C-alpha cells in the first residue's frame, strides 16, 4: 500500500471552506495543487483565504517566510476543469447535490488518465451512486475531511460498492502521509461521523423549537458542562446551514424517512433567509464585528 508522492499533482474542485482547507493539507505535504471552482471569484477568495491562513501561522512563528512562499508557489488557480488534467488525485468539494457532483466528476474523469483517483468530500451522499455514474467506478472513493481540514485529524476513507481496494489503500496511505488519522468505512448514509452527529444537531434543534432554552444557553451547556468542544448551534453556524441542512435531508431520505433524522424547519428557515452561518455573517449567531448576542 503506497501513498501518493509529493511529485503527484492534486486537483481540488470547489474553493469554499472545505476545498480551501483541503488545498492547505496537500500543500503542507509538498504537493503542487490546482484549485478550480465554477465561480472564478470563489477561486480568488479561496486562494486569499489560504494565504491569510499561512500568514497567521507566520505571525505565530509556526512557519517561516520561505515555507509560506514555497507553499503558495505550488498553488495555482484553475480557470477551467481542463487545468486539472495532469492530476493523480482529484478531490471534489462542491455543493452537496448528487446530480451536480456526478456531472462535474464525469466531466473531469474524461480529462484524467485511467489510473487517476477521483475522490469526493461528500458529507453524506452515496459514494456507490456517484461512482456508478462515472466510467471508471473502481477509481472513485470518498475522502471525507472535517472542518477546518488543516486542523482536524480525522479523514473517512469511504469505499463504494465498486471502489478498487487498491484505491482505498492508496488514499489511506496518503492520508497517513498527510499526517491525518484515516478511518475506513463503507458507503452508508452519512458514513460514520455525520450519521452519529445527526441526533446531536436534531435534538438541539428540537429543544430550541420546544423553547427549552435559548441558543446561547443550550450551547453553553453542551460546551461547558456536556464536554462537547462546541455547542450544536455554533457548530452548525461553522459548518454552514446550507451544507448541514442538505446533509440532514440526504440522510433522512436515504434512511427511508426515519423520523429520527427528520430535518428541522428552524434550520430550513435560516437557509431560506440566506443566513448560512459564519460564512454569510448571520446564522444562529450574528458575526457582524459589533455583534455580541445570538441573531434570531
Ligand atoms: P461551500 O459552500 O463553502 O463551497 C462550495 C464551493 O463549490 C463554492 O465555492 C461553489 O462556488 C463551488 N461550486 C458549486 N457548484 C460547483 C460546480 N458545479 N463546479 C465547481 N464548483 C462548484 O461548501 P463547503 O462547506 O466547502 O462544502 C463542500 C462539500 O464538502 C459539500 O459536499 C459538503 O457536504 C462537504 N463537507 C462540508 C463540511 C463543512 O463543515 N462545511 C465538512 C465536511 C464535508
Image (cartoon, rainbow, N blue to C red):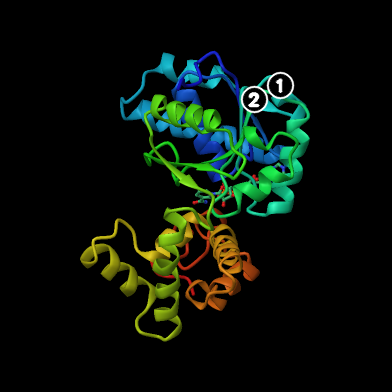
Q: Residue furthest left?
A: 225
- Which residue shows up at 71% across the image and 21% down it? 113
Q: Is residue 220 above or below residue 167?
A: below
Q: Is residue 295 above or below residue 19?
A: below
* Residue 129 point in image, percent of width and height: 67, 50
Residue 200 at least partly seen? yes
Quadrant for residue 138, please give it.
top right
- Look at the numbered disc 2 and give the secondary structure of its residue: loop
Q: Which mark is residue 181?
A: none
Q: Nearer the viewer, residue 151 or 57?
A: 151
Q: Nearer the viewer, residue 166 or 35?
A: 166
Quadrant for residue 173, please give it.
top left
Proximity of marks 1 and 2: CB atoms separated by less than 8 Å = yes
- Which residue shows up at 76% across the image and 44% down it? 103
- Which residue shows up at 74% across the image and 39% down it? 134
Quadrant in which the N terminus is drawn: top left
Residue 290 at least partly seen? no
Quick one: label 1, few (<14), some, or many (20+) residues within 10 Å? few
Left or right placement of residue 4 versus residue 140 in this view: left
- Look at the numbered disc 1 and give the secondary structure of its residue: loop
Q: Between marks 1 and 2, how big is the CA–CA gap?
A: 5 Å
* Residue 286 point in image, percent of width and height: 47, 64
Q: Nearer the viewer, residue 45 or 129?
A: 129
Q: Which mark is residue 116?
A: 2
Q: Which residue is mark 1?
A: 113
Number of residue marks: 2
Left or right placement of residue 1 versus residue 216 in this view: right
Q: Is residue 6 above or below residue 249?
A: above
* Residue 222 point in image, percent of width and height: 29, 67
Amino acid at each position: 500500500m503506497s501513498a501518493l508522492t509529493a511529485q503527484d499533482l492534486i486537483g481540488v474542485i470547489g474553493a469554499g471552506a472545505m476545498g480551501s482547507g483541503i488545498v492547505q493539507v496537500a500543500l503542507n505535504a509538498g504537493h503542487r495543487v490546482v484549485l478550480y471552482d465554477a465561480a472564478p471569484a470563489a477561486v480568488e477568495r479561496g486562494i486569499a483565504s489560504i494565504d491569510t491562513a499561512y500568514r497567521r501561522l507566520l505571525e505565530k512563528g509556526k512557519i517561516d517566510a520561505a515555507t509560506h512562499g514555497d507553499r503558495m508557489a505550488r498553488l495555482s488557480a484553475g480557470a477551467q476543469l481542463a487545468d486539472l488534467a495532469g492530476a493523480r488525485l482529484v478531490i471534489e468539494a462542491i455543493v452537496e447535490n448528487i446530480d451536480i457532483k456526478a456531472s462535474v466528476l464525469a466531466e473531469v474523469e474524461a480529462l484524467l488518465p485511467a489510473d487517476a483517483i477521483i475522490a469526493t468530500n461528500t458529507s453524506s451522499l452515496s459514494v456507490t451512486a456517484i461512482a456508478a455514474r462515472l466510467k471508471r467506478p473502481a477509481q472513485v472513493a470518498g475522502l471525507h475531511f472535517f472542518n477546518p481540514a488543516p486542523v482536524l485529524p480525522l479523514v473517512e476513507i469511504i469505499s463504494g460498492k465498486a471502489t478498487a481496494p487498491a484505491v482505498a489503500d492508496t488514499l489511506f496511505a496518503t492520508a497517513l502521509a498527510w499526517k491525518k488519522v484515516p478511518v475506513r468505512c463503507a458507503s452508508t448514509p452519512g458514513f460514520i461521523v455525520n450519521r452519529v452527529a445527526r441526533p446531536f444537531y436534531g435534538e438541539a434543534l428540537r429543544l430550541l423549537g420546544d423553547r427549552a432554552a435559548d441558543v446561547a444557553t443550550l450551547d453553553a451547556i453542551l460546551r461547558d458542562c456536556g464536554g462537547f468542544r462546541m455547542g450544536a448551534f455554533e457548530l452548525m453556524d461553522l459548518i454552514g446551514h446550507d451544507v448541514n441542512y442538505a446533509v440532514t435531508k440526504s440522510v433522512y431520505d436515504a434512511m427511508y424517512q426515519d423520523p429520527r433524522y427528520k430535518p428541522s424547519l428552524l434550520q430550513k428557515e435560516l437557509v431560506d433567509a440566506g443566513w448560512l452561518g459564519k460564512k454569510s455573517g448571520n446564522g444562529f449567531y450574528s458575526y457582524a464585528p459589533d455583534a455580541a448576542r445570538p441573531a434570531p
